[in-house]
Image (tube, rainbow, N blue to C red):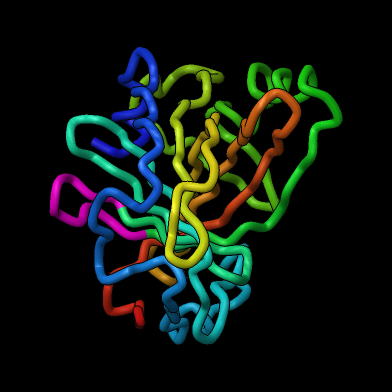
Amino acid sequence: MSWLDRLRGRATPPPIPAPTGAIPHALPLGFRVNGRVAFDTLVFRAHPQALSAQLPEGHQGIPAYGHIDLGAGHTLHRFYLDDDAYVQVSTAGDLIEGIKAFVFVETVNPPTQAEFQRFITTHEHLGAATIEYMGRQWQRDFSGDAGATRIPPVVYDEVLYRHDPPRRDDDLTHYAMLYRRPVPELDRDEFLLVTAEDYGPAEFLVTYAIGLDINTADLDIT
């Protein structure tokens, strides 16, 4: 079962825990706020035209960490990097379920809250079975309701930690949909995560991020 499936099965998002200041749990794989990470991009550089976005080169600082509680012991850990990218580690208890690297490729700023709500409820990029983006075709990556023309976005809350030493700095609600497309040259899939981000009554935006599955061998974490 994917993390989107688990989110989709929830009637309502779980409540965000009360502020505690410092990060109240261990982080996976040796990641830390204000640490650094580098990607091994050799395999991706071999076929640059096959991908919709390129992972950043060199060592990247980690100025922020996002914690998303999916319930039943499942968590998304997001480590935001200097160059508009992040590493997402999916865990079940102490087990690593998967690692993805995402690169932000577009940000849309709806002019009003009404336009933001309209995007969430009607835009094809948040639920259509097939969409076109960056000149490529993407299939909805959600196993349920496969025949539905459009499904509602999945909703989850994220707690953000920043600063040194790190402390809780922000909360937001995501309305998201994940798409994928095969990349035969790399024998793997490329992902498109479309997210409407709600920070409060007057702060909201829509982001598009391109991602790839990676593993620990692709990461140098310091």
Q: Position of residue 144 (x, y in %)?
A: 35, 23
> Residue 164's x, y, as percent?
47, 67
Q: Is residue 68 above or below residue 153?
A: below
**Magenta stretch encompasses residue 96:** yes
Residue 100: x and y, percent?
Answer: 39, 59
**172, 4: nearer the viewer:** 172
31 magenta-colored? no
Quadrant of the image containing the C terminus: bottom left
Q: Residue at x 43, y 60 (%)?
A: 166
Name the residue at the top extreme. Answer: 11
* In this rendering, position of residue 131 left or right of residue 172: right
Compare residues 51 and 15 and report the one nearer the observer. 15
Q: Quadrant of the N terminus?
A: top left
Q: Single out the residue that lies furthest toward the left.
A: 94
Residue drawn at the location 46% of the way across and 72% of the way down: 34
- Name the residue at 55% across, 26% down: 127
Q: Tell me where residue 49 sits by quadrant.
A: bottom right
Q: Which residues are magenta?
A: 90-99
**Main structural element of the magenta stretch: helix, strand or loop?**
strand
Q: Residue at x 42, y 71 (%)?
A: 186
Taking depth in this image into account, of 160 and 18 the one nearest to the observer is 18
Q: Is residue 169 left or right of residue 198?
A: left
